[in-house]
Each structure stands twice: as C-alpha cells, then as structure tokens.
Amino acid sequence: MALSSRLRTNVATLFDVFCEVGTTLGTELLILQKYPEDYTDENTLRSVCQFSFPCGPQCEDGAVQLFTFVLTDQQSSYTFAYCRYTPKNNSCLVILSALPWTSIFYKILNHLSNLMNNAVATDIEETLTRMYHTDIPSTGETLAVSNHSGTHKTELTVPDTSRLPTLKEDKFMLEFYNAVPEKLMIPLFVSLLKERRIIFTSRKLGQLSSCVFAAASLLYPFHWQSLFIPVLPVHLVDMLMAPMPFLIGVPKQTFSSLRLAELGEVVVVDLDEKTFESAHCDSLPSEVNSFLRSQLKFSSEMFLSDGLARSFLKTNVLLFGSYRLGFFRTDSSHEIKWDKEKFVDDQKNSLKPFLSSLLGTDGVQYLERFIDERLISLNSGRPISDEFEKEACLMDKRSGRGGRSSPETIQRAVNAVKENASDVVGVLKDKMSSMMIREKIGKLTPKELRRNKSFGGQRKKETSIDPMSFDTRQWEIGTASNVADTNGQIQHENSSSCSDLIDFSDPDPSPAISCQVPSQLVHQLQPSFASQTQSSTANSSGTRALFPPPSTSHSSPSLEASVKSKGHWEQFE
C-alpha cells in the first residue's frame, strides 16, 4: 500500500519472467531456465542473478527462504522480484512482476517448486504458460494456477492492496512485528521521517527484506523516495557510502565485514540482536510521542486487525493531517499552490520546531512528492479519498475541528449561499405555509354519527353526495330486518341520521341498538334467565340489549336446544 506511487502502470501480464538461478561447479551464477524463452533483457537477467544470491554462489545450510527485492527503472518505478532460495539444491526460483502481491507469489513459488520435484517437465511449462496468458484478476477475485489437465491446481484470492496491511495477511508486517520490539519502533519511525541513512541487518534473508518493506510502509500515506534496497548484494556494498538518505537491508555475513566508522552517520537496526543504534538524537514532539506510545500499547487484537499500521497512520495524521492549510490560490491563473511557511505558521507551537526541521531548505522528499501529487489532483478536479483523508476527518471531529477548512473552501461556500439565497427563502416560505395548513386541518374533527331509533319504517333513499365534498350534508340511514319464528316475527328497524359532517361541538351519545323478543319465547325461559331478561328490558313488550352483560345464571340444555331450534341462538350468545 505504501508503494502505490512507485508502481508501474503499463502492466499487461501477471509476471514478466520466471527464472531458475543456479551455479555451475559452484563458482558462476547462471540462468538455468526461464519462461518465456524470448525474454532477452540481459541487464535485468544479470541483476536477477546477483540479487538472488546476495552473499555469493557459495552453498549455505539452513531452511528454505522466501525473500523479495526490487529493480528500479528510469521512471523510478518498481519491479518486484519474488525469490525462493533452496540451500539443498543451491538454487533460487525467481518471479519478476509489477504486482505487489507478496503472499500470492510466495504461494506460486512453493507450488512451482513442488511441481519441479514431483511432476514432469511438461506440467511446469503448461502451468507457466497458463499463468502468463491469463487475465490479471481484480481485487477479491480468484486466481487459478494449474496445468492444462487441471491435475495440479491451486486457487488464490487477490488481496486488496488499497487497505492497510494486517499482521494476519501481510507477511512483511508480521515479520516486522516479530523482529522489532515496540520500544524500537518509535525511534525507527523518527529516523524514517527525518530521512536518515538506515541499515537493517539479519542472518535471515526473508526476515531482512520483510522488515525493510514494512519499515517503508510505516510512512503511509508518504512513500520513501530515496535509495531503497531490501537485500544488498555483496558486490554493491559501496552503496553504503552514498551521502544520501537510504533504506537498505544488509545480510549479516556482509555487515560483519564492514567498519561502521567508515560509513558515517548511519542508523543501524540489528534484527538478530534486537538493537537500535543511531548517530542522531532524533525525537518526536512530546505529545506525538505519547500518542504513538499509547496507540502501540493499547492496540487490541493487533494480529487480526490493521492496528499496527493504523497506529503510525494516526501519528502521521497528527503531524501532517492539516496540510491543506498551506494551500492558496494565485490571483492570476487561479491555480492552487502550497506554501510550507503558511502551513507551519498555522500549526501548534509544540509542533512547529519538528515540522520546520522537516521543511527546511531542502525538505524531505516524501512530503514534497505527496504535496505534488495532491496539487495535481486538486488542480485537475480529481477527488482525493484514501485512508489518510478518512482518518484526518475522524481526528478533526474528535478534536472539535470538524468545520476547519481552508479560506478558499469557506469562500466557495459563502458564494454558493449567496447565489442560491432566493431559492432558500422560497423553500422556507413553502415549508411555513404547509405547516400552517396542517395545523388548521388538524383542528377539524368529523362529527359522530347520530343514531335515532325508529320503528316500522323502511330504508329511505340515500342522498347523493360527492365523495370529495366537505360541505355540510344531511345524512339519513334506515335499516329494517325481519326475523321469522314459529309464533311470529321479530321486527328490527334501526335508522340513524347524521348532520354537519364537520362540526366542532361535542358529539351526542349514541343509543344502543335493540331488538324485540316475542313474549311466547320469553315465557319458555327458566325463571332466573327470564327475570334477568325482564330486568334488562326497556318496557313490558320484552325488548333487551343485543349484547347484555355477562350473567351468572345459565340455561339448561333443554332450554338451549329450544332456543337454537327457533333460530335465535346468535342473539343470546
């Protein structure tokens, strides 16, 4: 992720070339085989031989080692060389690719090594051919590695390189976390910010290259712009004399033969001894140092999350998150530019000395490159969105600086409000009008339907009403029903009328709906039930409420059968 600005853009194939590097008679390094056969870049092949055996062609005892180095082209873009060194055979398998998929290519190298030991030669060639001609998969997609018959197959998931690395998924960060104590990470981080001449050393090539890559990623969103050599070949040891910033991994066998006094002011991180030595007295501002210590100490679930990388990202946000304060727009061309003095002047007094030391006469290269890339995006209108910007917004909200913006941003907001002021006022008026209308309508309540008892009448013809009308209307509804029994008929008529559909007066109580029961049927009831019925009737004719209150007395089975046989059971349940 931290190397995104150094990646090649003209990537057409999954890898550039596959090589097996070995020796003849133990003295000379040669390319034993390669794919494709027509790859003829002799300078690159020569560099592959030298870097894949950084300590020379001599055979070493020990376990298989997986390590990575980079080759830099004229545009300062990286080509990654993924290596698998086998001491038993004194050979090294190498894949050159522009893709920063370390875990993917390490697994491919193990798969190819297994084929070389257990399969026939045609299986290896078929697998390499299918890999070379396959389309480059996108993030999250599956990369299938197999021969034509599919007998030797492995499937790999493409990682998301735009996310912060985790210890679980990133081999570089895991090796770094295991090799470098937390108390040494902070002085190392300061040395990276100061662009010192930094040397890592270890006996293990895999640990050495991983820690160099991981150290460079601590600068995110910045990118190390100076000399970068994860594993230094013995024939290039004079590079350590260069009077410029560098980040170099030196094998312990080579480092033991050096005289540190001749190297000048260097920073040395010994991964085997877990020590840190520096010729400088560099330190972070006290509040930044305390913040980083707390982040490294209290980062929970470090292995499963991106806690380690995010701790250093938050520290960079604390130092450089307000870089936009240095932007200004020229009067003539209206082009956005950046003023480092303006940026420093707007910082806290506790941060100014440290930032001024980084932005001196020369200035650190990683920050200059970062500002140049941001200016290109702003002047071209391209949006800027990455983990650094997201974390900067979150930190501004926590510190109460969420509304802090550059003068240009504030002026654009003011102009936008002025241009749209009339529209805003119109919208507010419409809102107020709708609120007043709703308040008035809310006071209108429909009047309760008035039910009037009427006997012997028939349903009257309903008045035709417009269903959408709110005018005062006179409603009159009449109902009649006739129920026959063995001795006579039960006639029920209910009519009701409604006036003033919208009314603000209190509603009148509605009378209960009643029905008439023949006297012959009442005489057939038991005394308890008959007495209850008579007490609830409105007159001597035997009328009662259709749904009387529950009674404690019960009718006998014979009575229930008699009532049900007359067809009036539903009126008494």
Image (cartoon, helix red, strand yellow):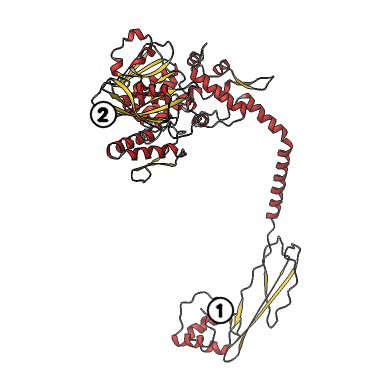
* 413 up-or-down from 266: above or below: below
Looking at this view, is 474 or 252 the one in front? 252
* 477 up-or-down from 312: above or below: below
Report the label total: 2
Looking at this view, is 46 or 337 the one in front? 46
* Amino acid under disc 2: Asn
Looking at the image, the residue that sits furthest to the front is 38
Looking at this view, is 448 or 553 the one in front? 448
- Looking at the rendered image, the disc whose residue lies closer to the viewer, 2 or 1, is 2
**Does label 2 or label 1 sit earlier along the sequence?**
2
Q: Is residue 176 visible?
A: yes
* Amino acid under disc 1: Ser
Q: What is the crowding at mark 1: few (fewer than 14 residues within 10 Å), some, or many (at least 20)?
A: some
Q: In the structure shown, which secondary structural element does the residue marked by tag 2 occupy?
A: loop
Looking at this view, is 39 or 259 the one in front? 39
**Which quadrant holds residue 94?**
top left
- x then y, percent, for residue 24: 28, 23
* 375 up-or-down from 300: above or below: above
Q: In the structure shown, which secondary structural element does the residue marked by tag 1 occupy?
A: helix
Is 25 displayed left or right of 421 in the figure? left
For the N terminus, the image quarter is top left
Q: Residue at x 29, y 12 (%)?
A: 257
- x then y, percent, for residue 258: 31, 11
- x then y, percent, for residue 110: 32, 35
**Which quadrant holds residue 81?**
top left
Residue picked out by circle 1:
536
Q: Residue at x 33, y 16 (%)?
A: 234
Q: Is residue 291 visible?
A: no
- x then y, percent, for residue 60: 25, 23
Label disc, if present, on residue 89 of the rendered structure: 2
Label disc, if present, on residue 375 of the rendered structure: none
